Amino acid sequence: MTKRRQHSSLGDMVSTAAFLGMSLYLLLAGFELQADGRLASAIGVWMAGGLCFAGSIRYPIAKLYDRLERLRK
């Protein structure tokens, strides 16, 4: 397995902020859809927001995955 590099470049920080910002926006948009009675649409938007949040924490997820892989071996 290759060693992961440090993720502290400006591009990494910008993409992380964009993913986090979109996840918050989609969370609020889902509540608006729910208030309008469109529950199926709200659930879809919340799922997209969850995926954006996962994108914003992708580097900690990768580190956790690496630790779990090391423990398995």
Image (tube, helix red, strand yellow):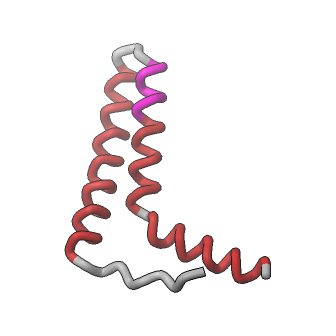
What residue is shown at x 70% (from left), y 76% (from top)? 69
| 65 horizontally vs 27: left or right | right
| 73 horizontally vs 45: left or right | right
Count of marks, rendered view: 0
What residue is shown at x 41% (from left), y 57% (from top)? 55
What residue is shown at x 31% (from left), y 63% (from top)? 16
Q: Nearer the viewer, residue 57 or 72?
A: 72
Quadrant placement of the C terminus: bottom right
Specify whether residue 11 is painted magenta: no
What residue is shown at x 65% (from left), y 80% (from top)? 67
Quadrant placement of the N terminus: bottom right
Residue 41 image position (x, y, % from top left): 42, 22
The quarter holding residue 14 reads bottom left
Task: Tell me: residue 26, above or below residue 64.
Answer: above
Outermost residue toward the front?
1
Task: Tell me: residue 41, above or below residue 1.
Answer: above
Residue 38 image position (x, y, % from top left): 41, 16
Q: Where does the magenta region start and end?
A: 39-45
- Magenta span: helix, strand or loop, mainly? helix
Residue 53 image position (x, y, % from top left): 42, 53
Outermost residue toward the right?
73
Residue 26 image position (x, y, % from top left): 33, 39
Task: Tell me: residue 17, above or below residue 33.
Answer: below
The quarter holding residue 10 reads bottom left
